[in-house]
Image (spheres, coloured by chain):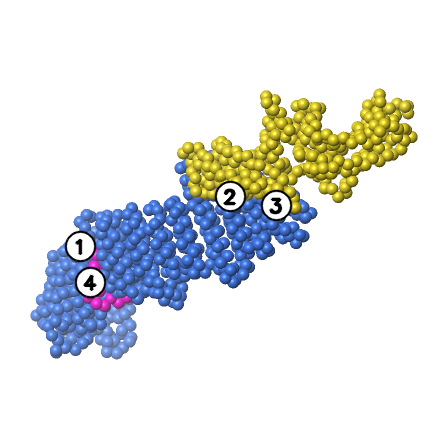
Amino acid sequence: MIADGVEDEEKWLSAGIAGLQQNAFYMNRAMDSNNLRDALKFSAQMLSELRTSKLSPQKYYALYMRAFDELKRLELFFKEEAQRGCSFIDLYELVQHAGNILPRLYLLCTVGSVYIESKEAPAKDVLKDLVEMCRGIQHPLRGLFLRSYLSQVSKDKLPDIGSNYEGSYTDCESFILLADPELRLAIGLSGLQGPAREKEKREKERNALRDLVGKNLHALSQIEGVDLDMYKETVLPRVLEQVVNCKDDLAQFYLMDCIIQVFPDEYHLQTLEVLLSACPQLQPSVDIKTVLSRLMERLSNYAASSTEVLPEFLQVEAFAKLNNAIGKVIEAQVDMPIFGAVTLYSSLLTFTLHVHPDRLDYADQVLGACVKKLSTIGKLDDNRATKQIVALLSAPLEKYNDIVTALKLSNYPRVMEYLDNETNKVMASIIIQSVMKNNTRISTADNVEALFELMKGLIKDLDETYEEVDEDDFKEEQNSVARLIQMLYNEDPDEMFKIITVVKTHVMTGGPKRLPFTVPPLVFSTLKLVKRLQGQEENPFANETSTTPKKIFQLLNQIIEALSSVPAPETALRLYLQCAEAANDCDLEPVAYEFFTQAYILYEEEISDSRAQVTAIHLIIGTLQRMHVFGVENRDTLTHKATGYSAKLLKKPDQCRAVYGCAHLFWNDDQDNMKDGERVLLCLKRALRIANAAQQMSSAARGSTGSVTLFVEILNKYLYFFEKGNPQITVAAIQSLIELITTEMQSDSSTPDPAADAFFASTVRYIQFQKQKGGSIGERYESIKA
Amino acid sequence: MNFIAGAFKPPCSISVTFADARTRKKVPLKKENGQTLMLPLFQNQDNIVGQVVIEPTQGKKLEHTGIKIELLGQIELYFDRGNFYDFTSLVRELDVPGELYETKTYPFEFSTVEMPHESYNGVNVRLRYILKVTVSRNYVSNIVECQDFVVRNYTSPPSINNSIKMEVGIEDCLHIEFEYNKSKYHLKDVILGKIYFLLVRIKIKNMELEIRRRESTGSGPNTYVETETLAKFELMDGAPVRGESIPVRLFLSPYELTPTYRNINNKFSVKYYLNLVLVDEEDRRYFKQQEITVYRLLET
């Protein structure tokens, strides 16, 4: 059915165009033969095509444009006619003989425009008459096009009238004359009501019409002579009066919008009070928030366009006025959804930020007002409203590029309280992103406190109910928090320590899910502080409150302990080891020992997975090897334990590797008191035994002896210590090991393993290489036969 | 053959010419056969002066029992065709009985003739003025020649000319108030006015103003009334809202109006009405008719 409608419309349009062209042809012929009477007759017939009610605005526009072109020619003809002696007054009367009103008025406007141009009559009078006569068209669509035609043909003629006072007076009057019916007509748009099912179509038509109204108003605003004073004194009050009186919500909305879009920014600025005072008087259903938002948007852009205009804003106290008006509107429109109110505040805030970037108190005021409004309704569940709040809260961040400034807004966190959890998180992410993007240093504990208060949503679970959260999203969030923690920095260690304390307090509330993400950055950030302190001289005058590494380590201990509740023993273990190393660097033996103890406890009690155990034991060995702070006793205890753990690993190869790793614990190149060749050899031998056992187990279980990789690895260890000058590692031992490997490789039961073969081959090559290189090491190698 | 041919041929030709034919204004008049003739225009109490030329057919003598010229003002009602009612009848004897051998010219003059009524060509009635020349003969029929002329009478603007103002409506449906600036208009006048919509509850499609002519002929039971719509002038397109006022400006000059004639010799009347018509979307018509008086203003 609808398709039919469209087709029909096409048909009607083409029929209309055909009729129009035919009559236009006759009209042109009559004009060529200077036959005024016929020209008028056919032009009227031509214009009769515009009387159709069957076309949609777009189609009608197509028709109108054709008629418009033809009327241009007619206009020329009228001018020629006047030169031939036909007086304008006669022409003006003659065209009014047409029986149908629409063609009559088009012709009248055409003659009228020529008449004005001729200056034979005061433009004001002619225009007044034209506008008055146009009232005869009450049909919204046709009327709109007719008026559009009138303003188009008269517009370019008006400035010619003269620039003296008289002239501008005339212009103003003309403006009013044109504007009045224009407004009435727009009001009439609301009369375009049809059956409900055509609602969408109607909306579309209305939009098209609104464009046209806007265009007309725009044309009017271009008339010279409408200067600021006139606009302020006459034009705007008249227009607003009309708007307020029309009592139709849609029309009011269109018109306010048109006014705002059409007139220059500086006019709005100077007449802000008048304009705003009209707002509360509009119908309650008018979409006032959009109107005001657009106004503020325009003003913001205006302010942003040049700094020269800013004094104007101050002069007219734009902010105070807008703030007031918004307050009133919100008060007046009780039913306005919270979404609307928030939108308004958001626009106002954007405006303030653009116009008064230096006045944080203004921004805070806006947020305060918003909080007040929000407090009346509690938590938000309106999707759009929360979106707007996010926009509202993001605005200061974008403007200042600096969260520190935003943190000064005392009402900022209060607004956030009204967001639901989800949005709160989004907002927190935005804050973090802003920090990241701008590389903001947040350097005081107070700011950090405030910031974390804002990000509560990310830091901890806000309510008990368990929410299904996407794993990836959650990781993303927490990673960003982790990044943020790294951004906190202050040169002063005391302040930095405070910051860390604050962060810790917040992070600790995060619960088992978040701690694995947040604790490591915090620990490393703290360790960085330790490193800084370590570089400094010990301050002899330091009072008790000043930050010392000791204090920090205490704090670290607490932090890492928190992970046990998660539990995340592997992470905790690593962190302990890191701390131990840091303590080692600070020469704090008891602290380091304590950390190691913690790590061992974790290893014993929490890490049960054999693979994890392997990793852990290697970490422990590696760290322990580097520790130099321990006394002999402590060291013995720790190494002994580590060796013990190594021997107790589940899989033989793991055992073997851990044990030969332990060999390093007894040999530290840098420290002479830590070179215990005997125990190194012991470890290696033990490793060898284990490797043997592994080999046997393998042959027992699978019938093949398995790879010789372990032996080759042990050989490498032998060579390492041999090179380092361990007297316990003899050439004979190496020699026998090589033989053992060779035998193993040639035995039938062994499984061929190319990787192990290659490994062995390159080890042998290394020995050859060292031999050839000569020098002291080369000499030692000389006796090894490979 | 000559004899027979001669019997059908008029024995003479008669022509009537006016003394001021060259300078006198001529106006078109539509004849019954559809042709338009340009005829001299007179007004009440004009002197009608001219001459009659009678030219006998070549080589024949014309015997007559007297020649006269009559000025007649006639009203002809079409339902009573052929019966002329003469309200004016003046006679001038031009010649005594005798014989005419050659062309002869007779001057004539009717001075300050009373011609109170205007020439009028209506639907059912015609009022006309003629000059009728009659050559009376014995035994054979008289030779008659008629010359039409047109009479128009001018009046000065009326001293009292009130506006027409009226509020009409259908209860709770439509209330309008209309105003025409005068009640008496001359033929080239402009009707100015306004239509105020006080209450609109029906969907109006358009509004037009009609000029209607009502010609009533005869009297008593034999009265014939004929109404013609001379003009349809669209005033408004679309549906007005309450409080709207629509301007009226109607030029009368394009329409062929006559002045209002009231009871001309008890034979006929011609009256004019303005009919305001509102049409709603279901094509129902709401109208209100008002009489206006039309007069012929003395052109200066």
Instruction: Give above or below for A400 relative to A133.
Output: below
Which residue is at 52% across, 33% downward? B289
Q: Residues under labels 2 and 1: Cα distance?
A: 83 Å
Looking at the picture, which amino acid does disc 4 mark? Glu
Q: Which residue is mark 2?
A: B247
Residue A383 in sight from this viewpoint: no
- Front tag of 2 and 1: 2
Q: Are marks 4 and 2 in contact (CB under 8 Å)?
A: no
Q: Colour of chain A?
A: blue
Residue bounds of the magenta highlight: A439-458
Q: Chain of mark 2?
A: B
Q: Which badge, 4 or 3, is on the more N-terminal residue? A: 3
Q: Residues under labels 4 and 1: Cα distance?
A: 22 Å
Residue B21 in sight from this viewpoint: yes
Residue A94: image tag: 3
Q: Residue B222 in the image: x percent, y percent?
A: 61, 22
Looking at the picture, which amino acid does disc 3 mark? Leu
Q: Which residue is mark 1?
A: A512
- B18 and A139: which one is in front? B18
Q: Which residue is mark 4?
A: A449
Q: Are marks 4 and 1 in contact (CB under 8 Å)?
A: no
Q: Which badge, 1 or 3, is on the more N-terminal residue? A: 3
